[in-house]
Amino acid sequence: MAIATCVFDAYGTLFDVAAATRRLAERPGHEDFAAKWPRIAEIWRLKQLQYSWLRATAGVHTDFWQVTQDGLDFAIEAVGGVAEGERAALLELYFGLEAYPEVPAMLRALKEAGRETAILSNGSPAMLEGAAASAGIRDLLDEMLSVESVGVFKPARVVYDLVGHAFGRTPREVLFVSSNGWDAAAAAGYGFRTVWVNRAGDPMDRLPWRPHRVASDLTEIPELAASW
């Protein structure tokens, strides 16, 4: 069955999650931060994901903006602190993350081919709107689906159900793309066709399912969507 709808994870897939820390490090007057930003970015992202999984498992939901702040606070403490005002600056930058360079052309190619496009993300609606508007890609997305409508983070199956509810498509008509191997794998288990965007060259996660394809970036997604 042909792919009708292409759905993307947001953070790390369409939007560069390291951009907030990198951009602050590039600003004059933040030389001390520049020495520690890679470590902050790494810990921040790890704790953000871990807190979403733990909350989903425990059944104690909060929105992703709170999880993002909690992860940042852990990272800041882990590296010994940051200067006054840098925490607030990082959160402001995160709210308006930039997209990876290939994203606009990739989404435009999918739309020109007649395919529906969407985000399916742990992010809150306000976060997703802020990032999409900042990156200039909002008009290239038919839907931005947030876990806030079901109150649990990925990879809960009820999150993947949102795609069918929004578009009326069967799982086999959906291509799901994520930079998180666990997310692409879980979506494959759900029944979507999946691509893992493995920018870092990480090993495959040991899970009951595997992504159908692996790519180094998003450039070939329109071609892959046409090949199924």
Image (spheres, helix red, strand yellow):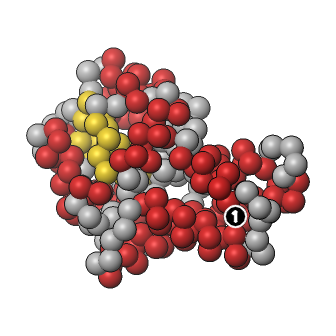
The residue that appears at 47% across and 40% down in the rendered structure is 130
Assess disc 1: are there few (<14), some (14-19) or many (≥20) residues with their C-alpha within 10 Å of its C-alpha: many
Kind of residue sitting beneath label 1: Ile
User: Residue 219 location, x and y as percent?
Assistant: 50, 32
The residue that appears at 72% across and 44% down in the rendered structure is 23
Residue 27 placement: quadrant: top right
Q: Nearer the viewer, residue 66 or 6?
A: 66
* Viewer can see residue 217: no
User: Residue 86 location, x and y as percent?
Assistant: 73, 57
Relative to 226, is 89 above or below?
A: below
- Going by the image, does 221 lie left or right of 103? left
- Going by the image, does 80 lie left or right of 88? right
User: Residue 117 location, x and y as percent?
Assistant: 31, 33
Q: Which residue is mark 1?
A: 40
- Of all residues, the one furthest to the top in this rendering is 112
The residue that appears at 86% across and 43% down in the rendered structure is 28
Residue 228 placement: quadrant: top left
Relative to 213, is 71 above or below?
A: below
* Viewer can see residue 87: yes
The residue that appears at 20% across and 51% down in the rendered structure is 162
